[in-house]
Image: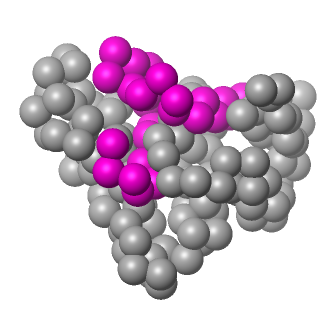
Amino acid sequence: MMSARYIAKSPRDLPEIAQALLTKYPDPGVFAFYGKMGAGKTTFIREICNALKVTDNVSSPTFAIINEYHTRVESNVYHFDFYRINKLAEAIDLGTEEYFYSDNYCLVEWPELIEDILPDQAIKVTIEVDPENDSRIFSF
């Protein structure tokens, strides 16, 4: 499948890009967000959660590693941040794979640290910062 590219010149562009992602990949599954520190992974995930009608406050699970959010349609969205794990076993011990195969949305920050257990069908979302104008380039 061909990769889609979108440019966000400001945070106001994110809802449209989040909707484009969910339109292209409408089914729940694992979405892996790649980008450097400060690229806007959590900010973009917040917009995806808005589009999914999450009713909870969306914040980075940096210390908790997993946040569970509820939606208005009585489903769950799981938000992972693996930045602080030191080895793959930590992610496995958290039951990560059970979440990944739960038929819920799993939004994963720092997936490169757990690639060995990411499902093959995980949707890869890359966020790059354009240093020329501080815009964000999204590919998925």
Number of on-image labels: 0
Towards the viewer: 57 or 129 = 57
Residue situated furthest left in the rendering:
93
45 horizontally vs 100: left or right = right
Q: Is residue 126 visible?
A: yes
Residue occupying the point 75% across, 32% down: 139
The residue that appears at 31% across and 62% down in the rendered structure is 68
**Residue 57 falls in which quadrant of the image?**
bottom left
Residue occupying image coordinates x 45% and y 77%: 71
Place of residue 135 in the rendered image (x, y in percent of width and height, measured from the top left): 83, 40
> Can you give x and y, in whole percent of width and height, for residue 97 in the image?
26, 36
Q: Residue at x 22, y 19 (%)?
A: 88
**Could you say which quadrant of the image residue 74 lies in?**
bottom left
Give 132 or 140, whichever is nearer the viewer. Answer: 140
Examine the rendered structure and indicate whether residue 26 appears above or below residue 84: below
For the record, the magenta segment spans: 101-129
Q: Between 23 and 133, which is closer to the camera in this rendering?
A: 23
- Image quarter in which the C terminus is found: top right
Queried whether the magenta region covers residue 55, the answer comes back as: no
